[in-house]
Every structure is written in C-alpha cells, then in structure tokens.
Amino acid sequence: MSLSLKAKLLSNEPVGPEIFLLTLEAPAIAAEARPGQFVMLRVCPGPEPLLARPFSIHGVEGGKLLILYQVKGKGTRLLSQARPGVELLTWGPLGRGFDLDAKRPVLVAGGMGIAPMAFAAERLEERGAAFEAFYGLAAKEALVAWDSVSGEGAFYLESWGWTGASEDGSVGHHGLVTEPLRERLKQGGERPGAVLACGPLPMLKAVALLCAEFGVACQTSLEAPMACGVGACLGCAIPSAGGGYLRACQEGPVMEASLVDWKKI
Amino acid sequence: MSRATDMAVFVGGVRLANPVLAASGTFGYGREYSPYLEPGAIGGLVTKGVSLQPRAGNPPPRIVETACGMLNAIGLANVGLNEFLAHKLPWLAEQPGAVVVNLYGESVGEFAELARRLGAEPGVDALELNVSCPNVKEGGMAFGCHPGAVGEVTAAAVAEAQGKPVWVKLTPNVTDLAPMALAAAQAGAQAVSLINTLLAMAIDAGTRRPKLANVVGGLSGPAVKPVGLRMVWQVANALKAEHPSVDVVGLGGIMSGIDAAEYLIAGAKAVQVGTASFTDPAAAGRIAAELAAYCAEQGVSAAELSGSLRI
C-alpha cells in the first residue's frame, strides 16, 4: 500500500560530483519499499517548482529511506540545499520493482542507475542469493561513495566483486559496460536467469539488444517526465512493443525489455 | 472557535456533500487516489474523458513543467467506454461521492451514443461533455469554440442522457466565453465547467525544439487561476441574467481552500481540483477541509458563499 506523508530530512550529504545521498525518516514507506520502486518527493511546498520529482529508492535502513540523486535542474538543485529537520512531502513506494526471484541474476548499472541496483544487490545479499553485477561509469570520479563511514568510493566494484567499466579507462574495463556484459553472456557457464538493468537510455537499449541476442530475460528500469506518480496524469508514456503506451509509473518503472518498443523510445 | 457550517451544495442537478470535485484528467478513474483520500472527503470526482473506442494518446514527451504551472498534451488517452463500464465504473459507483463521467466524441453522433450508454448507468450521477480539449485533432476544442456547435452537441447529449444531468466543460481559448455558456444552457445543460487548459507552448532554446512532441499543449496550475476567476465571474453573470437555474463549476489552478473560496465568491456553485492532485495526492481532500474551515470562520454556508462577490 502506498501512502503520502511529510518525511523529515535526516541528512543530505554530497557523495560525489553533484551527487547527494538523502536520508528521510519515513518508516511506513521504508517498510514496503522494494528495489526498483520509487517515491515522489516535493522539494518545496510552494508553487515553484510546482511538481514533485520521482526518485528511485536507493535503500532502507530501519525506518529510514535512502535516496541517491544527481543535481540535474531547478528541483534537484533546491533539494540539494535542503537541511536536516525540514519535512518533505513524500508519497510511495510506487510502481513495479525488479523481480528478484530469477535464478542467478546479472545486475547492470550505468551511472546514476546504481541507485536502485545497489538496493537490489543488498536485498539479494540478504537472501543469500547468488548474483553477478556490472557497473559502468564515464570516469572514476563519478563513483559514488555509498559508505560514508568508511569513505570507500570503490565499494561496489571491489568489496562486492562488481565488474567495473569506465569510458575513460580510469577504472575497470576501458569502454562501455555492455562489453564485459557481452563477454559474460557469450561464456558457457551458468546461464543467468535474468539481466536486471538501470542506467542511461542508450545503455538500456544496448543491454536489451544483447539479452535478446543471447535469449536471456531482461528487466529494464525506465524513466519519463512524470507529474503524479500514481497513474493518473498519463504523462510518463513509454512506447509499447504491442502498440500504444505503457505508464512508467504503473506498468514500470521496471519493465520486461520485450514489452518496450525500443525503436520509438 | 467557529461552528461547523453546511457545506452541501446542489449543483448542475447533483447533490454534493461538499463543493469540491476532482477534475477530469487529473484523478484517473478515482481508484488511483484511494490510498491518499479518506472516503467521502470530497464531493465527488469527474472521470478521465471516456471515448467510444480506447485511445492510446499522443507520443511523449506529453508533459512539461513551466513557471507555476505545467503543460500537458496527453491526447485523451483512455480505456474506452466498454472497459470503463466493465472495470472502472463498478468500483466508482460504490464510493460515497458523486460520479460525473467526462465524455469525448469526435462527432455529434459519438457524443449522443456515449450519453445514451452512460446515461443508462445507475452509478453515474452526471455527464460532463468535453468540448474543450486542446490536444486532439477531431472534436475537442473544435466544438467548444462556436456557440452553434456547443448547442448542437449539448442538445444531442441531453436528448439521449435519459434525464441524467449534462454539464459542458468549456475552453478558455475563445475571445468571449459567455456565448458558449449560454448556448450550452439554451440546449439543456444544467451546468458549465470552466476553465479547461489554456493553449500554450514551451521551447528548449538549446535545441530549438518544442518541449512537447505535440508542439502545443494545455497550461494548468496556479499560473492560470486569475484567468479562471475572471471567466467564472463573467459566465456566472451572463447565466444569472438569462438562465439563472444553470450553474457554474469553477476550476483552474485551485491549490488551497482559499483558492476554492475565491471561485465560489466569483459565482461558481462548486469547484474542481486538478493539477493540485499531481503535486499532492491528498490535495483535493485537504482543499475541501480548508474550504469548510474558511466557511465556518466566515459564518457562511458553501451555498451562501457562491456569488457573494462585493463590488
């Protein structure tokens, strides 16, 4: 069940270039949150900016909700200036998350796509489920320091055994994350039950294509401009492979790649 | 401490427990908002526009935020009449508030057919004709810009609606709205709802491309409230002179109970809350409570507040 509440901001710390980790006190939402789901967040109560912003859920810690975000425009800039103690109107958890029941899934994150993928990895770890993970970045500097205590910027890549790739070669494989992913899918070995991906649209398209080529199920997390988050405004239309449109907020944000018309998106 | 006051209103042939309705296109088919509103918190809702056949809507991007507002060009995406009757209306009919079904046809015949099928449904309290959508090629705003066409569509729907009240939702994208309202009233409408969105556009200077795939869209939100208030006041005055039994339902940028009160003062009998629900899923219920508090403080009923502008 989704619900709306005024969530108290507990911390809002920079963890990378224009990247912030926001912690909100929202036990009722945190209790229900699943990886791949999102919340709508009003960055200020006034009429400017008017609309709430959708944010992937990055994790939960007890009753706390973690949001990892990059400053992109007016709304996220204002959010980055919000201080502990303020209350932000928040509703969720919303949408369809990842199906974590696939056998030996492969996680693929690109850039800020790490936000929901880290949460997925955490839940898989908790279950003791085997999985593999890939993380693609533009450059090493974009690595997110998840663990503010240890300050470990390379946390995902090293401690969790993630395979890294960077476009400038500063960390991991020199190139796109889809290159090591292709190598992995080409191997014989144990076949992944599904690939779970979140990242920039070109990456998602490439991952969807790769999975189709190797006959592996693929779940992609998509985004679109969105006003309400609850299925009413019909703003977040994603072209459907079957014709017409799917709502990123209801039928998504995580959709089977085969349901999406990647040529029209 | 002010005493609670009577918030019930009789508007456009429908009794509402309070004068706040959720506006068409911003509240889905009601169920989308059920986690966020107490049952009975609002007087009722107006559904997303229903057409005879399902409509996929326009290509994305369909929405863009603007200063104190937003543009949309959804293109009347909806599940179609059959799906609405089979899977949306049964749930709605069990809810405490009034159910007003917004309907959209591409021809007078389609409006009549929709009115006939929906008019026969016991769960429907009133019909709202959408002759004002700025985002579709056929029908929509084309009907709403000519008094003759408004009258023709309204008369056809009223004739088929089997006694169900017919409301007509009007577009602000005309020089003078009063002739449209009078034409609707003359043809048997029991209320007019105004305003729909203002035709508008947004441009990305970096790419020199329109921000909406449809190029133009409808502006809504707090930015349009002064326009809506002016039009409600003008139309209410025109109707009072010639068709005093026909009501005005006011909408456009209502974000608070005070905004709603302003629309009632301007001459509306009831109001609709639209874009506010996007910015806060509990907005419509909150606005109804704030309006009740305002009325109590002022010592007036909702009905008394209506048309009480002091000039």
Image (tube, coloured by chain):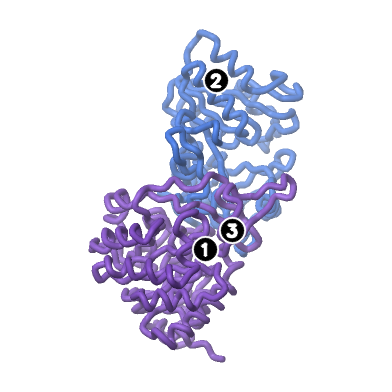
> Considering only vertical position in the picture, is B135 above or below B1?
above
Q: Nearer the viewer, mark 2 or mark 1?
A: 2
Element type at marker 3? strand
B20 w.r.t. A94: above or below? below
Confirm or deny contact between disc 2 and disc 1 (CB under 8 A).
no
Q: Amino acid at mark 1?
A: Ala
Give the chain ID for the blue colour: A
Which residue sits at x=49%, y=33%?
A: A260
Mark 2 lies on residue: A210
Q: Chain of mark 2?
A: A
Which residue does the image show at 65% across and 33% down from the upper left? A111
Q: Which residue is mark 3?
A: B70
Q: Specify few, some or many for label 2: CA neighbours under 10 Å numbering under 14, 14-19, or 20 or more.
A: some
Q: What is the three-letter code of the residue carrying label 2?
A: Leu
Residue B91 in the image, given as x and y percentages of width and height: 29, 55
Q: Secondary structure at mark 2?
A: helix
Q: Position of residue B123 (x, y in %)?
A: 26, 62
Q: Position of residue A249 (x, y in %)?
A: 48, 45
- Callout 3–callout 2 Cβ contact below 8 Å: no
